[in-house]
Image: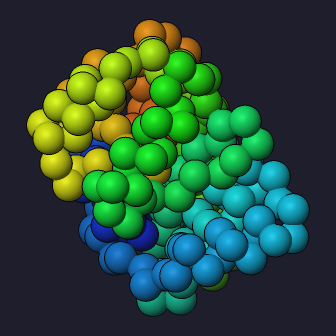
Amino acid sequence: MMKIVLASGSQIRASMLRDAGVDFTVDVPRVDEESILLSLQAEGAKPGDIADTLAEYKSRRIADRHPDSLVIAADQVLTCNGRVYSKPKSVEEARDHLLSLRGQGHQLLSAVVVYEEAKPVWRHIGRAQLTMRAFSDSFLDDYLHKAGESVLSSVGCYQLENVGVTLFSRVQGDYFTILGLPLLEVLDFLRSRGAIQT
């Protein structure tokens, strides 16, 4: 079967693929996501295009090292009221992000791009709509204390699979997309290429 490489340092993305029985290796791209994000925003790029471009950039960086493999890369963008959020750099910045999302609906876009022989061969963007409840300041302080620095690993400052679920009043969309990888669509693509069992 064709080799599969995950171009991501995300533990949750690796866990999702591993739990689904996919055999793969990891090669983490060195990408200045913040600079790319700022450049795309300055050009007026739409959130879906930003997520797709970031995923493609990561996949392309790794594809040259693995020309005989399917290289999977993903990226996630959160958008709310016209603002595109990136991962917070500190717990204090995470608190500011959560305050601005409190009581609001937002959209998560999870893009995935697969390269083969240094060319993009497949891409997909999963979308999910989430609504944060109007939690109190004291709840937020307690949440940040419990979650700790894990809030820095997520564009929305939450991990839905853990204590982050307590921030929400409504969640619409694919669970795997929310976690950062539209897994069902990825698995369908891998089956279509004979990279995993059908």
In the rendered image, which quarter is residue 119 located in? bottom right
> In the orientation shown, which residue stands out farthest toward the right?
44
> In the orientation shown, which residue stands out farthest toward the top?
169
Please report the residue visible at 74 percent of the width from the left and 76 percent of the height from the top. 39
Instruction: Looking at the picture, tell me which residue is in the foreground, 31 or 116.
Output: 31
Residue 125 vertical placement versus 46 (above, below) = above
- Residue 43 percent location from the top left of the image: 87, 70
- Residue 125 percent location from the top left of the image: 66, 43
In the rendered image, which quarter is residue 158 located in? top left
Q: Can residue 183 be seen by looking at this rendering?
A: no
122 lies left or right of 96: right
- Residue 75 percent location from the top left of the image: 53, 57
Please report the residue visible at 81 percent of the width from the left and 52 percent of the height from the top. 46
- Residue 166 percent location from the top left of the image: 29, 19
Q: How is the image coloured?
A: rainbow
In the rendered image, which quarter is residue 109 located in? top right
Instruction: Looking at the picture, tell me which residue is in the foreground, 84 or 102.
Output: 102
Residue 136 vertical placement versus 71 (above, below) = above
Look at the image and tell me in which quarter the N terminus lies. Answer: bottom left
Please report the residue visible at 59 percent of the width from the left and 23 percent of the height from the top. 104
